Amino acid sequence: MPARTTMSPPLPLTSNQGVALSDPLNSLRAGTRGPTLMEDFLLQEKITHFDHERIPERVVHARGSAAHGYFECTRDCSDWTRAAFLSKVGLRTPVFTRFSTVVGGAGSADTPRDVRGFAVKFYTGEGNFDLVGNNIPVFFIQDAAQFPDLVHAVKMEQDRGYPQAASAHDTFWDFISLMPESMHMVMWAMSDRTLPRSLRMVDGFGVHTFRLVDAQGVSRFVKFHWRAALGVASTTWDEAVKIAGADPDYHRRDLWESIDRGDFPAWELALQVFDEETAASLPFDVLDATKLIPEELVPLQVVGRMVLDRNPDNFFAETEQVAYCPAHLVPGIDFSDDPLLQGRLFSYTDTQLSRLGGPNFHQLPINQPRCPFQNFQRDAVMQTSVPKGRVNYTPNSLAPEGPQASPEHGFKSYPAPTTGTKVRQRAESFGDHYSQARQFLASLTAPEQRHIVMALSFELGKVTVPTVRTRVLGHLAVIDGGLADAVAERLGQPGPAAEAVPAVAMPPRDLPPSPALSQLASRAGGLAGRHVAALLTDGTDDARLASLRRALAKAGARLTLVAQKIEGVRLADGTAQRADQALAGAPSCLFDAVVVIGSENGVAPLLNNPAALDWLRDAWRHLKAIGLDMAGALLARAAGVPTDEAVVVLDTRRGLDTFVQQAAKGKHHAREGAPGTDH
Ligand code: HDE
């Protein structure tokens, strides 16, 4: 479109052929009440285009949200890699990052229990590098050949077409019960990691072992980690379920609104770099994607920071059409022989052929390298460039000014020595399926362990085939007898509930706990980036509201005002205060901490209002800090909400400070098990 000024007359609305339309809203008919005419080419063009607006959704990771930003290198990594974007401190590389759920369709809710995809496209000066990871450092399976089965098992069952976006059903657990190598990932999938509070509060992992290659051609292994500046935080299960109803776009909205407000989410990129000798000395195989390397064995080294500071202009053109691929590498980074990674290298380009229609998807603006790129690949569906001249082949002597190979600087695969017989056989070193599952469980805090028991018993409680349940319990018993007993107890399975696992390839070893694996033990804390709601009534003290606003702004939190009616309330000083949201549409599950401030008269209509009573009951149940003035205390009493240190009376200045401190602690796990909470 031509550049415009405010003085220009409006541009004509045209057809795709550039013909100006006189009336875009009426089709051509024989008389005002007569039949529509075939010759209405303008109607045909518009409807045909509309009919084809959708492209196939991703077979996995269909539901996603993305943002633009930059990666800034903070450590010169030229001692490990020749990749330029990692070698110049201060260099900023544009990125486009897409977060996703794995199982549900594109229109599913944001908060099911699910792994989150964490895919970053770096538009480096040497070509695009895609780091296509997840928010969990390991995976369910070891070999690419198992992936279609895993995905079939977890997605909606093929006859009935449900459940959508849920692993709590027979086919998933049937598959898992026959797949012992999935046990480590199952522990992560049943942990709080799969119930993220926000996409801004997830860590990311490249999962596989990759290689870094320096300018001398020396290779080291590497694992990639993204660490959220806001720390990792989760909802409770009940909260996630209620959010799915109250705001299915909870994560998408949260990411969009944070960036829109200028509260930019950020992550550190940290590397675990290790040589072949270290890899050989580890008690598991670094090529096995069901294993992680504890930070205590190979420390994380921070090399940069990613900031997401711009929302997409167009969801379809960018978030939907972005095509990530683990095979998009730049010189200085290379693959390992991880058999899961090797299978992925082919799959992602293949899937784009059906999603984006042909091999020219790299020409879409979101996928184009930002550095110059040129070669002799030609033609094909949706070719948008117009190559010039006669020469479309290499070598050639007719166009010496054309692109040539770069023997010095071009990508060279690391010459890893390879020998072997062709076999369809798993390496023996991949055989320990339980030790790291046990280690993960042992590394968590008591509330986190309890949540795993609750998640497993919920999921297995949805399994209708009893033998599937007992088979899973058998695997849990190998991981940890106490875990299996606790889950069996909650399921009400009598007697020896677990079916012994017939052939445990390698009995688990007790590995030392790795405290870094606990999100509670390592959480950053603080109220920054969090969302607090205040329920107001007529007669709310204006000064108290003003101090609350100030205190939260200082702590970096966002305040939303909720009132029974969207038109708001009249404050004690007589001024009208509009609400940001009406109570019926803003249940407390949407916020991190809540406050009720009002007047005795003003709160009276709320004392028998279920939405108001549930507002506080759920805040209590979801382990949130609650701030109450006198009117709020009346509502809390009517709701039967008990008190503890995180239920704070706001009547003094100190009260407000205490509330902010309590809210900054995040969830009050000490409350778990108290009446009105999940246990
Ligand atoms: Fe993917 N995966 N995957 N995956 N994956 C796709 O590619 C696949 C795996 C991951 O935001 C698909 O463009 C195979 C592991 C993310 O667009 C598809 C195997 C990890 C995304 C595909 C795996 C991932 C995908 C579907 C086993 C974590 C979303 C659409 C060998 C390290 C990227 C698409 C986005 C998407 C195949 C396993 C992460 C079908 C065959 C392990 C984050 O190509």
Image (cartoon, helix red, strand yellow):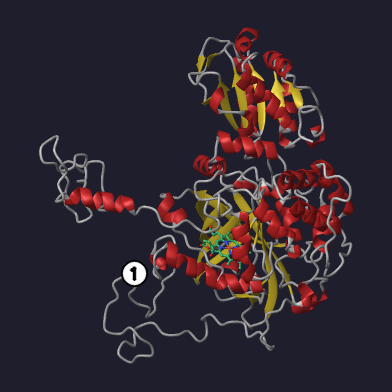
Q: Quadrant of residue 329?
A: bottom right
Percent coordinates x, y for residue 545 in the rendering: 61, 20
Q: Which residue is mark 1?
A: 381
Percent coordinates x, y for residue 532 in the rendering: 63, 31
Question: In percent of the image, x 74 and y 65: which residue is there?
Answer: 181
Percent coordinates x, y for residue 419 in the rendering: 68, 89
User: Seen in the image, is 18 located left or right of residue 509?
Assistant: left
| Residue lying furthest left | 31
* Residue 369, visible in the rendered structure: no
Q: Which quadrant, please, contains the C terminus? A: top right
Question: In percent of the image, x 47 and y 48: which residue is there?
Answer: 311
SS class, disc 1: loop
Above or below, 649 relative to 605 = below
Q: Quick one: 38 or 603, which is closer to the camera?
A: 38
Labels in figure, total: 1
Q: Quadrant of residue 337?
A: bottom right
Above or below, 372 relative to 178 = below
Above or below, 196 relative to 388 = above
Q: Quadrant of residue 426?
A: bottom right
Graded by Cα atoms within 10 Å as few (under 14), some (14 to 19) or many (20 or more), the crowding at tag 1 reads few
User: Seen in the image, is 335 located left or right of residue 667?
Assistant: left
Q: Quick one: 455 or 376, which is closer to the camera?
A: 455
Q: Amino acid at mark 1?
A: Val
